[in-house]
Image: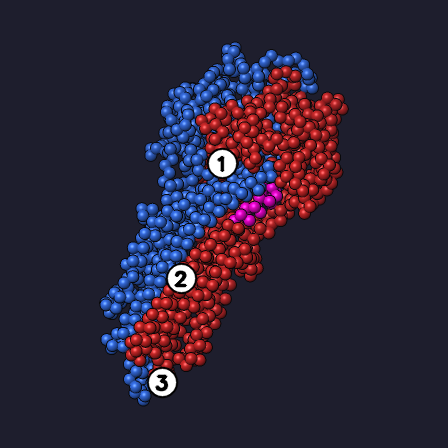
Chain colours: A blue, B red
Amino acid sequence: MLVLLRIMSMVWRHKGRLILAYVSLLGATALAMLIVRIVGIAVGIVDEHGAGAIASVDRDEVLFAFPDGLFWMAVLLGLVSISRGLFDFFRTYTSESLSQLATYDLRNRFYDKLQNVSFAFHDKEHTGNLMSKATSDIETVRRFVMMGMIRAPEVAIRLIAIVCILLIMDWKLALISLSLTPLLVVRSSIVMSRMRRMWARVQEVTGEMVTILQENLTGIHVVKAFAAEEHEKKKYAAKARVVQHEYLQSEQLQGTESAKMSVGFTIALGLLLWFGGRQVIGGTMDAAEFTQFVLYLNLLTFPIRMVPFVINVYSRASASGRRLFDVLDAISPVSEKPDAIEVDRVSGEVVFDDVSFSYDHGAPALSHLDLRVKSNSVVALLGSPGSGKSTIVSLIPRFYDATSGAISVGGMDVRDFTLASLRRNVGIVQQDVHLFTATIRDNIAYGNSEAFFEDVVEAAKIAQLHDHIMELPDGYDTWVGERGVTLSGGQRQRLSIARTILLDPPILILDDSTSSVDVETEMKIHKAMEEVMAGRTTFVIAHRLSTVRKADLILVLEDGKVAEMGSHDELVGRKGMYRQIYELQLRPQEEMLLDAPLQSHMGAVTG
Amino acid sequence: MMRNPGSPTLDILDDEGTFGSPYDHKVVVRMLGYLKPYKREAFISIASVLIYTAANVSIPLLLMFTINEFIIEGDRSGLDIMAGAFFAVALAHFAANYAHFIFIPRVSQKVLYDLRTEMFDHIQTLSPAFHHRTPVGRLISRSTSDVMQIQETLDVIIQSLSEILTLGGVIILMLVVLPLAGVTDVRLGLLCLSVIPVLFLLLAYWQRYAKRSFVRIRQAIAIVNGEYNQNITGIRVVESMNRQEQNLANFEKLNREHLDANLQASRFSGALNPMVEALTGFAISSVIVMGGYLVLGGSIEWGVLLAFAMYIQRFFEPIRQLTMQYSHLQRAMAAGARIFEVLDLKPDVVDSKGAVNVDDVRGEVKYDKVNFQYVAGVDVLKDVNLHILPGETVALVGATGAGKSTFVTLLTRFADVTGGSIKVDGHDLRDYTRRSIVGKMGMVLQEPYLLSGTVKENIRYNHQEVTDEQVEAAARAVGAHDFISAMEQGYDTELAERGSNLSVGQRQLISFARAIVANPRILILDEATANIDSHTEMLIQNALKEILVGRTSIIIAHRLSTIRNADKIVVLDHGRIVEVGKHDELLARNGAYAHLYAVNYGLNGTGFDQQDSPVEAAGC
């Protein structure tokens, strides 16, 4: 219920429209009653004059007498109908537009929330499920606003108004006719909770289905490489089958409930015919009253058929609303302090003070790290996969917060910065390169869309991408697809580098960034990087000796701990882990550098 | 990954563009075609709708009859009988209503299931070029939100069926049955129903304007969803680059367009109401005046007035609903057109009619005068001839854009050759079913892509026949076993989306294991070690020595050690093979390879050893 109240409070932002909606639906309902009243009176007049066997009744008199001639009744009826139509226009328009406005707000909020929660949230949530929430659950909320918030009160008002009118007209007959109504109410509330559970399940499996779809589409090249279409289809079909089953259950429940409600109403009409007919025969009721009674009851057809539908909309919305609020309420573990400071540009000093970290309460990915990095120095991180290299660098721009200990940048705790200003100061070239559907220029300027074109070109030149871009027919205005598909892996990585260079951050993080470019380009990038690194602190997860050697500080990590730390010369002398890596992986590169080109097959290296 | 210089069929799914009329009867006919397999259920549904409608129409009739014949006459026992009859009708009404609510969802859900799986399956068969151009979010939008729209509509169609039938029933009653029975005057019915043609004229006029806004809505929502998907998949860049504000502003713009389209549509929906109401008012008024006149003249009873008023009340409400449903139908047509647009895209690679399943291959591969063009007139591969013997290792080298990726792409039939042929064991690739022949190959791509599920499921992937032991053996073979078993859940560890809880290197090791788990005769490595750290690469290079034994392998790599050990080095340049031979031969020839070697591995030497030493195994 709380969920629905929250949705309602979101709609309340547009209270002008909401009030207009209620006013117009009240007006439309009242006029609908008035129409029945007029028809009833008209039938009464006809009955009165027609039933009295006076053959010579003056038809013109009955038709055109003012104001209670049939003609004037008809005119009145026409006017009332048109007014009702106008009210109805406003009711329809306001209810639809309200539902759209509410989902417009919701979509924006949801979108913004998703881009402001921490990485830990996205580590756990599947894109497909989030997509399902953004589409199917939001749509459900929209229907709730339209049907639940505006249609439902209309149904209720109609029901109550008609019941009251009937009770006033003839309370005994009303009670007999409506004797089944309380049963319907009880039934509705029972069904409501069952439906809520069912819909929660439907939305959940729908999310799972979209996840399969989304993963399949994103990884379609793998699917095709393995000719696994059949396998994927089975997986999807199995989930679609569950969705079908769950959906069917809830639809049938809604439908059969609707049938039960309808029959209750039809029986009411039958009871009215039976007992009311007797009263008319007995003379205690006249044709006008009977007609009105029947027509009023008839007006109930529609609202009664709507009841299960409305219940359905409520149950579904509370299931979907829950799923949406789960995201909207997600408290990002990485959040700004209220008094966070907007820092312009910091010095590049980075200090880790007894920092430990674990992902999602798992085993520690980093334990008790102490590290002091001076401004403008280069730190190389080495270690096997999972040793904590990436973890260290993702803590600096606060993609995650340290579980304990503190990290400071330029002498200030990272948690005292505003997130935006911290991340402006810490540039990162990530391992997974993501390009957006936009031009190359816009992709390079992604972090600073106000950058001058010259600066974009300059960054591309430094990243050794400029020449390639110029070869493309549209140059910098070339669109790259959703996954940067018209660029090779190496080119994408260089674009990612250009993107970060453009931000000119005092602290730069290069995460495995040059491993997939070809050798020639890699060499160029390394030269460029030397320029880029000058004047900033650089953390580089490196595999190349050329980079590692030049580093001011080398960290060798093992199981989230620093196994060795020092400069190249120090560490080589120590005969520890670094020495081992050096001998096995790095030194051969050095040999290579010393050897003359094409001079091959010589001297083995001791390993 | 295959690059594509542009394929002619790609821009069809352009959501910004406009496309033809959404209200296409072909769409309706095709939609109805989906009901075919469920004839029985559909038949029961329609039968129950018919009974329901008949009961619905007869309720006011019964009332009228009772009033005219028994109440006005004062016949109490007749009234009792009629009340009994009334309850009987009510029961039939209920039973039919109940049945139709059981069967209609059954049909519609099955149709949706068919539609969903058909779309999924079809989208999978479309060429990689198509996928590379089409944002995932847009396809998701079509497969989910458009299908949902159809779902609602299917329900609506069947519901409106009952309303249309009711309307027909009422028309027949008012114009034929009742006048013939002498209960009423045909003029009363005519007057009362004269509003219906007017209504339909108005509707036809209205829909000309309204439909545009419905198409606009479907397009706008696809763009909104596309933006959602893009932002979620790129979230790490978004957050690290502080793009939130700007992205939100941009999103608000797209979202606003969707809102505007909807607001426009709701004005259209709303505008129908006054029209329908005015006409309803006219109908009731005419019954009162004309009917009253007739009652006064003694030609009809007042029960007829009541019945007519009831009919108008009951059945004009449905007409109003019908107009609403009409707008629903409009939305659905737009959605249906978008779905069929996807289903009508022709896949580039299809199995030929006589294609057979291949059981086993030796791994002999022959490229015979192979040509390939993505776009007519632009050769990506030209006259490529190459004979690879079973078990040979072939290294492809050449500059970016020389056609290396395309070369292997054709072997796995991501696309088909445009000239010449590729033969495996002497048979044209196209003589086999794609699934069976590609199933004999293992491929490792530059970027490891894992699916959610456990490590074990990812290694096994589509080879369900592979045992747990084989999974472990494959992992051991590529050197992945150690890190996998070091995880708490071992092979049962659940991977996060895209395996993001593993490092890129670990992901690549798993995709290596996945490639060899089914013991493929042909192994393709497309820059498989380019994206990983040197530690992982060392593991892989060590593993490769054994993995490559007895398999035909085609390798695109930078690493000299890999290239040098190949049985054949194939040098590609602008889509042509310019040199083939062993490392030493080619160097001695002092041609293209020697040049490449000098440029890439000789002068800068950032990453390559040349020693026959233990170090070489590390492959750095």
Viewer-proximal residue among A186 and B220: A186
Same-chain status of marks 2 and 3:
yes
> In this figure, which residue is indicated by the disc labeled 1?
B452
Q: Residues within 10 Å of mark 3 (few under 14, many from 20)?
A: some
Q: Is residue A194 visible?
A: yes
Mark 1 element type: loop
Check if residue B130 falls in the magenta segment: yes
- State which tag comes first along the sequence, 1 or 3: 3
Q: Chain of mark 1?
A: B
Which residue carries the number 2 mark?
A: B95
Q: Residues within 10 Å of mark 1 (few under 14, many from 20)?
A: some
Number of other residues with Cα within 10 Å of mark 2, as a class: few under 14, some 14 to 19, many 20 or more:
some
Label 3 marks a residue whose chain is: B
Q: Are marks 1 and 3 on the same chain?
A: yes
Which mark lies nearer to you, 2 or 3? 2
* Kind of element beneath mark 2: helix
Q: Residue furthest right?
A: B589
Amino acid found under the numbered disc labelled 1: Ser
Residue located beneath label 3 in the image: B297
Structural distance between the alpha carbons of marks 1 and 3: 80 Å
Same subunit, labels 2 and 1: the answer reads: yes
Q: Secondary structure at mark 3?
A: loop
Q: CA distance from mark 2 to mark 3?
A: 41 Å
Image coords of residue A150 (percent x, y): 35, 57
Q: What label does residue B255 carry, if any?
A: none
Q: CA distance from mark 2 to mark 1?
A: 47 Å
- Is residue A256 rendered magenta in the image? no
Percent from the top left, x then y, of residue B380?
Answer: 69, 39
User: Which residues are drawn in magenta?
Assistant: B116-133
